[in-house]
Amino acid sequence: MKKLLAITILGILFCNTSFALSSNRANYEYEVCREGMVANGNTQARAAEYCKCAVTMISNKYTDKKFDKIIMKGNAHMMKKINFASVHCNKYKNAK
């Protein structure tokens, strides 16, 4: 019984991190997003709100390696793959 419990707990922990950007990568993507938003005329507050949401959603779906593969296919491909986050974060303030 203890082995089953340990396996279940490890499985849950592994599942929570198996689709996530590393903290360094998430911070980098957040800064790139925020700088781009501000450069396009958004306020610092809106840029921070939007980028936190977008990076959270992207991190919930992609690892660093998977996101690198998407980026390598070009900007248009990347925008298509992360559009779900943009739509959600433009509609709602916080990612879920």
Image (cartoon, rainbow, N blue to C red):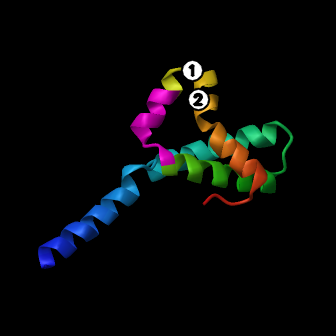
Q: Residue at x 44, y 50 (%)?
A: 20
Of the pair 36 and 67, the residue shown nearer to us: 67
Q: Quadrant of residue 52?
A: bottom right
Q: Residues within 10 Å of mark 2 (few under 14, many from 20)?
A: some
Residue type highlighted by circle 1: Gly
Q: Position of residue 35 (x, y in %)?
A: 72, 41
User: Where's residue 37, x and y in %?
Assistant: 76, 41
Q: CA distance from mark 2 to mark 1?
A: 6 Å
Using the image, tell me which numbered label, if any, was put on residue 74. 1
Q: Which residues are magenta?
A: 61-70
Residue 71: % across, % down: 52, 27
Per the image, label 1 sits on a secondary structure element best described as loop
Up-down relation of residue 32 to residue 14 (above or below): above
Q: Are marks 2 and 1 in contact (CB under 8 Å)?
A: yes
Q: Residue at x 46, y 31 (%)?
A: 68
In the image, is residue 86 above or below residue 3?
Answer: above
Residue 51 lies in the magenta stretch = no
Mark linked to residue 78: 2
User: Which residue lies at the image location 72% right of the left edge and 54% below the top edge?
Assistant: 48
Position of 37 with respect to 14 (left or right) is: right
* Residue at left offset 67%, top offset 49%: 51
Q: How many marks?
A: 2
Picture quarter with the C terminus: bottom right
44 to the left or right of 25: right
Q: Is residue 7 left or right of residue 62?
A: left
- Give whichever of 33, 16 is nearer the camera: 16
Residue 89, percent across and down? 71, 50
The three-letter code of the residue at mark 2 reads Met
